[in-house]
Image (spheres, rainbow, N blue to C red):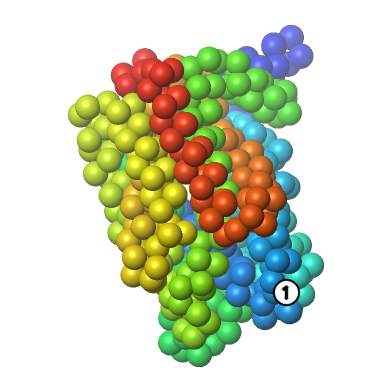
Amino acid sequence: MSRDPSSSQPAAATAPATVDGFGPAVRPTQDWRVLLAIFCITSAVEGLGVNQIFAFAPTYLIQMGVAGADRLRFVGIFSALIFIVGAPLVPLWGVWADKYSRKVVIVRSALVEALVFACVALSREPWQLAGSMLLVGFQLGNTGVMLAAIRDSVPRHRLGTAIALFGASGPIGMAIGPVLGGRIVDGLHQGLPVMFWVSSALSIGTALLVMFGSKEVRPSVVPQGRLVTLAFGAVRGVLTDPAIRRIFLIFGVAFLGTQMSRPYLPVLVEAVNGRVDLASAIGFVTGVAALVGALVSPIGGWIGDRIGFRPVLVGGLLIGGLSAAALPLLPSVGTLALGVLVFGACYSVEAAMVFGLLATEVPAERRSATLNLVYLPLYGAGIIGPILGALIVGFGIWAPFAAAAAIFILGAMGVAVLGVRAGRPAP
């Protein structure tokens, strides 16, 4: 592996790309479309299992004997636990990936998520479930690494579409997860633990797929220096760049609204459906509807390539806010599914537009570090959003959705006023 340079060289310096310290980096002979497909499958499986936790945590807590107002608070707090441990480690994973191996970091994430889902399957008490969700933090840090590898592999004229496809893969997996869970629980009459064991096995499969099916993609600039120093420098470089800071702020707004309201969507389903075949109803609303919504993301990327990322981002935030406000008012499973379809489509398009802005606006020397940290706003919003939701849900189940709607609409106004650039090719 590459070794740190001598003490005479600045810790945060960069050098031409190398492979294991020997000579210049060589682009992989692997077709970028194959690499994109592997990463999309990996992202989808991760989303599948994580959204099963979100979708069925309220039901799981009932089975553990937690009900009433305590359950609503627990749902919000448990959702925040996912990000508390992992957020500080994400910059380290990004630097480690650029310095040594992106592929190893991605495989590490898949193996950890397999362990997490197994621990969730074994949980029988609320504290055990909480401990399992804390472990999710150790699997974070792979999405930005995959996104950086895609940016270094895909031709510029295909970048918007490729990023949109990758951006849709996570939501597609998140859509499939609850549907699969409903089939396992209501169709096959198995318990929730069986569902999580299946997700664990799928995660092991993605680890093997990445390890043996993909080739290493090295960054155009390989960082040289101490790991902690480079990680701190990457975060500082991102947060001190005004353009990147504005884009991250917008992304944080979208994440904050989503993370504040998403944990309570299964509770809305329960309210209009009842507990008979509840798993199937949750799967339909958070799964089928979200799947259709996620499929809109590539269309958003195609439009963004032609008219610019900013107008599409403003539209996604505005429509997403209106749909979030409407969700608690919908009277049936069918109408709720339609509302989630619109909300999910907007979220997918927002993510794709932000990915596109970062991939095209950031200079080459900072691009990989920035893309590695692309979900930094998610980790902050993932802690703050569910906690805020848990605090205001006491006013009624509508409150987190109303607050999320206000955040989305304010975000749309902010994008329009701040005038984030429309995405021109970076050098």
> Which residue matches tag 1?
66
Q: Secondary structure at mark 1?
A: loop
Tell me where residue 293 appears, x and y as whole percent: 33, 54
Above or below for 421 versus 184: above
Residue at 49% x, 85% y is 276
Numbered disc total:
1
- Left or right of 54: which side holds 411? left
Q: Residue at x 35, y 42 (%)?
A: 319
| Residue 253 seen in this snapshot | yes
The residue at 64%/75% (across/down) is 60
Q: Decide if residue 221 is in sight here.
A: no
Quarter holding residue 355: top left
**Outermost residue toward the top in this view:** 8
Q: Nearer the viewer, residue 329 or 312?
A: 329
Query: Vertically, is 295 above or below 148?
Result: below
Q: Residue at x 30, y 28 (%)?
A: 311
Residue 330 at x, y = what percent? 40, 63
Q: Could you tell me residue 302's position as x and y percent?
A: 23, 38
User: Split into 4 quadrants, where in the image is the N terminus?
Assistant: top right
x%, y% of residue 98? 56, 32
